Structure formats: structure tokens, C-alpha cells
Amino acid sequence: MKTIDFFVNGTEISVTCSPSKTLLEVLREDAGLTGSKECCGKGECGSCTVSLNGLPVCSCLVLAGQVHGENIITVEGIGTPENMDPVQQAFMDEGATQCGYCTPGLIVSARSYLNSIGHLPGLDEIKQALGGNLCRCTGYTKILKAVQTAAEKQLTFREL
Amino acid sequence: MYVSEIDMLSPHSLLECLYLLENDKASFRLLAGGTDAVVRMKEGKWQHDCWLNLNNIDELKFIAIEKDEIHIGPLATHSEIISSPLLQDHADVLVQASREVGAAQMQNMGTIGGNIGTASPAGDTIPALFALGASIELTSITGKRQVSAEDFFIGPGKTVAFPNEIITKISFKIRGKHDIGIFQKLGPRKAQSISIVNVAISLSMKEGTKECLGGRIAFGSVGPTVLRAKKCEAMLSLGELSNDMISNISSVAWKEVMPISDIRASASYRRDMASALLERGLYRLMKRWADNERKPL
């Protein structure tokens, strides 16, 4: 057992657990943030994507001992139901969900990607950025449309 | 042994890490990005006492140029390699290979040192390192040694590194304007897939012509380790790299590889695809070369 201190969604938390516990389990069981989901557990599907120091990573493959002192943003930290992020709003407006299991991961990936660029991304660029997130319900059409809408909104907002 | 019983030590300096490896009685596994290591732990394949987490060792994180050599720290992530202007200019084949490792999530965590240490025959950066003629520095508490990338791997998951050694540097000679490279991969889908076959090509061209002065070709995922295609390489400098010449060279590729049939593809498919990928790679490379030559400086 080790005590690990790190920041989740801007708040410092301290958990005492085995350092070999995955970050995903720590977030869900110890921090009570059940937005991030476990699906494949091997880094193939991206359902567990969280942002580690601003970069999207699979939290099912990050061990608790590796995040001591680091900064984590989960889907809960991106927006709340009352105050949604443009990406979340666009997912709602475009109807880009079906069962919703992959959605938190997709939102974190999309948010991290949009933060890292300063231009309006093309469809291929969005596909490349979301290549690590799988959705098994629907096609990806609405998801890609939602990210495009969010990107447009964000860019006009910045210009204003 | 439960997963929860595996402890973790996070040394803050290389010396501390080497000291632990040399003197501690516990069985260690090195943890860099964890994108492979954690999967093995979950599958129960690795039942060690303790992780040695390398992420706090800042002296292993660098991408630098020194005289005529490029030095890469083993903890450089694939994302850092992709976005490095230095490597984009001088090691295009490695940048392309790193771009093919998994998707964004894997590239942000995975490191080049981890890719080498895992020594998967399908590891994407390894053929690129073969093509660049890279050398790998191993350090233990008693000293350092240099091993060329080709001598480093001895089988699937097996390398010449001793348990008390860690990779501390990857280096290769800087490449000129006339050295060009390309990485080609065949996977079940575009993003986030393990290679069925991959190939890295690096050529030294004669200015203003389609003649090649020499080069290296390395295939991945078609043998117990990455393999250099020496017969194909010998043919590169026989004459102008015309489309006919390219297809002649590629038709020899199947003799160079020794693939197995597994869950991803059959041996005969892999043999055919090795030829096809080499042909495609050489063709694209020569097209790029011709386009660049035509561009006014």
C-alpha cells in the first residue's frame, strides 16, 4: 500500500492503495468518478480515456504509482450537466450517442485534440485524432459531425 | 501472486535505479510507458515482486543533436518523436514509424525505449532503427556498452540486455539531404493495430538522378526478430531505381523473410505482403524523391 497524491479535475486528492492498481480503478473506486469506463482493459478501445497533463491516455494502462503529482482530467472535469462543454453540447445536439459507453472517452479525446490545435480540423484529421476510440453501436458519422460542430463553435468563439 | 501485491519503486536518478537493479533481491520489471507491460501484468504473464517506475528519471528524457549524431533518450514518447522538428528533418523513417504505433493514447504514453525493451517482432520503431543503423547504449552500475540495433534482439521478447542493465540512449548518424526514408505498415485497420508486416527503407540517393548509392531495408513481423533484407539491399545500387527495377527487387523479398502463421495472418500471406509493401514503399519513396528534385530551391 502506498499513498498517492495527485490532481483530479483541479482538486488535489490523496488515495492509499496498491501502486499497481490502475488509474481507472482508482478514479472509479476511490475517487467516485465513474464517468470513465472499462471495456477492453488493453488499450484497444479508448473507453477509459482521461487526460494526463493535457494528453489523452488510456487510464486502464496507467498505474496509480505513475500518476503521483500529475494532473488528471476526466469527463466529469470537462463539463457538468448545467454547464456543458461545447463538445458535450455538440454530442447532444447531433445525437452522437447510442448506448453511451464510449462517449466519455470520445469526449475526453475530442476535447484534448481541440485544445491542441488552432485551426478548423478536416474530417481526416478528426478521424486520426479519434482513431483510438471505438464505438460498437452506431456508425461514426454523428460522432465526427459533433466534433466538427464543436470545433466550428470553438473557433468562432475564440475569434469573438 | 495477486496484481495488488506488486509493489512499485520510483527512483529519481539513473544511479539510484541502477543501484536498485544491482543490489536489491526483489525481482524487478522496468516500467516506462506501461502500454505493453501493464497488459502483461493483467494477463498474469508477469509475476514479479516490484515495478521499477522510470518516469521520474528526467535524465532519460531527451532528443538532442551532438556533432554528427542524433541522441534519443529511451523515455522519449512516440508523440515527442513525431512532433520533434529535429527528427522530422533527420530521421523521417523513425517519425513515420512512431506515427504508426497505436493511436494517440498509446503514442502519448508509449516510449521508444519501451518499444525496444519489449522486443516484439512486430514492434514498429525497431525496423526504423535498423534502417537508420542505430546503436543502443546499455548501462549498468559497472559501466556502459554500445550494441548495434541489429545485434540487440535475439528472439521474440529477448534481447542481449542483462537484468542489471537498462537502455540509456539510442543514437544514429545524422542523415543528409540525399538520405531518404519511408515506413510502410500493413495492419487489420488504419489506427491502433499490430503489424501483420511492416518495412522500413532508408536510401542514400545520388543528387539529380534516380540512382541509389546504397541503403537499408528492414522487415518487421516476419520472423523471430526484425530482419534486414540484405539480398534486396544489394540490388539497390545495381542501377537506376526505375519501376522495373523496383519490382525486381521486391520479387526477391519473400526469400528474405521467415514468417509464421498466427492469429493475425498466415505465413504465405505475410510473404506475399512483404514483397508488396517493399514495392509500394520504394515506389512512393522514388516518387517523393522525383517531386523534391523538381522543386526549385
Image (cartoon, coloured by chain):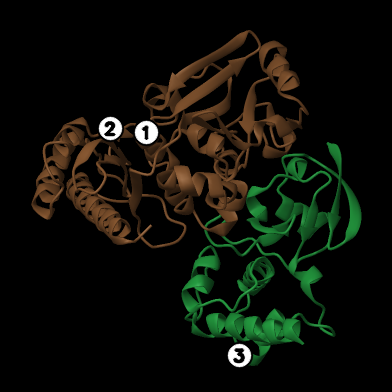
Chain colours: A green, B brown
Q: Nearer the viewer, mark 3 or mark 2?
A: 2
Name the residue: 47% across, 57% down: B192
- Tell me the subunit letter for badge 2: B
Tag 2, which secondary structure?
A: strand
Q: Quadrant of the C terminus of chain A?
A: bottom right
Q: Respond whether the residues carrying marks 3 and 1 are from the same subunit.
A: no
Residue ranking furthest to the bottom: A93
Q: Residues within 10 Å of mark 1 (few under 14, many from 20)?
A: many
Few, some or many residues within 10 Å of mark 2 (<14, 14–19, 20+): many
**Dot 3: element:** helix
Chain to which the residue tagged by mark 3 belongs: A
On residue A154, the disc is none
Residue occupying image coordinates x 49% and y 33%: B116
Would you name the residue on which mark 3 appears? Answer: A94
Q: Give the quarter of the image for residue B25.
A: top right
Q: Position of residue B44 (x, y in %)?
A: 56, 37
Disc 3/disc 2 C-alpha distance (Å): 50 Å
The one nearer the camera, B82 or A139, is B82
- Is residue B164 visible from the viewing direction of this image? no
Q: Secondary structure at mark 1?
A: helix
Residue with the mark numbered 2: B228
**Whether residue B197 can be seen here:** yes
| Amino acid type for the residue under numbered disc 1 | Phe
Q: Residue at x 84, y 63 (%)?
A: A9
Name which residue type carries label 2: Arg
Residue visible at 65% across and 72% down in the picture:
A118
Vertical arrangement, residue A42 with respect to residue A140, above or below: above
Quadrant occupied by the N terminus of chain A: top right
Q: Residue furthest front?
A: B297
Q: Quadrant of residue A148?
A: bottom right
The residue beneath circle 1 is B130
Q: Upstream in the sequence, badge 1 or badge 2?
A: 1
